[in-house]
Amino acid sequence: MTPPASAPAFLASAGWEGARIAPLAGDASFRRYFRVTDGEKRAVLMDAPPPHEDPRPFIAVGEWLSGHGFAAPEILARDLDQGLVLLEDFGDERVRDHLDHAPQDEHGIYRRAVDVLAEIHKLPPCDVPRYDREVYLREVNLLTEWFCPAAGLDVNMVGYVEAWEAVLPVVENDAAPPVTVLRDYHAENIMLLPDAERSHGLGLLDFQDALAGHPAYDLVSLLQDARRDVSVMTEATMLAHYKSVAPVSPDFDAAYAVLGAQRNAKIIGIFTRLCQRDGKPRYLDYLPRMWGLLHRDLAHPALEPVAEWFEANVPHKLRGVLKPEPRP
């Protein structure tokens, strides 16, 4: 986590000459983050190095969110050629960290997070690509591309795609109009802000991959969290709350289950890839939770073709703990 060599000159050009740069966090991508301190001033430096990363989508979606009153970090300075962006600092209190120490606050915070989504969903989507079948299939194929080989499974690849093509129309043909889907809306990407009046006191992060899609997707991301346990009761209560504050279609519950299965299958593949390709074995610790969530979604009648494929191709004893060797 050494700052990029160009960081001091970039900060100086933005009025932060001599500022202290300290590692803040990394994520599952090539992006890195540093806290910048200059006296009483604080900011966050995003290092999104090209060609691996492009900060333009983050900036565009962030400006759209801010323009509609949501709390995305203000852009203080940018150098797109070097992939450097200076951001407003939302502090250190992530929802995940807060709830680890104050689980009694889960209901209230999640209710506010659902309210933010409902307000986003009342707006026409921002100018981003559609979350279409090509994307859905590319994502679910990560499970057969990475997890299945790691588990030593020789599976019916054609049948897997056919099963998903049989269930995705539940989402595609739903009457719900497309909304801005942030795609990683969960407790590690939502910050608790000191100003409780600003967008329900919740700051938004990690939305550079936003697409225009079904409103249930970000609810799945929030309520079937890959990184923390959300109780079945909390999930049901928050779904009911969303339905009380936002219009939903008759097929909403089926679409929620399909998108839950789609997202969870994708993440199983991604976490396996992070271990094998990127040398990040800690992500395997999340696989038992992901398989548990996927099992719950597959129980919905709308997922019957996909559930049958898993029964025929992935033995239950191989769903969960995995210790794959890195790919050469």
Image (cartoon, rainbow, N blue to C red):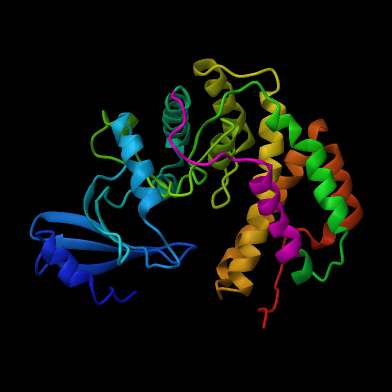
41 with respect to 1 (left or right): left
Q: Image quarter for residue 157?
A: bottom right
- Number of callouts: 0
Q: Image quarter for residue 317?
A: bottom right
Question: Measured along the vertical axis of the image, is residue 76 above or below residue 211?
Answer: below
Q: Image point 80% across, 32% down: which residue? A: 302
Q: Percent x, y for residue 227?
A: 54, 52
Q: Image point 38% across, 47% down: which residue? A: 205
**In the foreground, 157 or 152:** 157
Question: Measured along the vertical axis of the image, is residue 6 above or below residue 321?
Answer: below
Question: Measured along the vertical axis of the image, is residue 245 above or below residue 173?
Answer: above
Q: What is the magenta segment's predominant secondary structure? A: helix
Q: Percent x, y for residue 159?
A: 87, 51
Highlighted magenta segment, given as a residue range:
123-147
Is 108 part of what is drawn in magenta?
no
Q: Image quarter for residue 116?
A: top left
65 with respect to 44 (left or right): right
- State which quarter of the image contains the C terminus: bottom right
Is 139 part of what is drawn in magenta?
yes
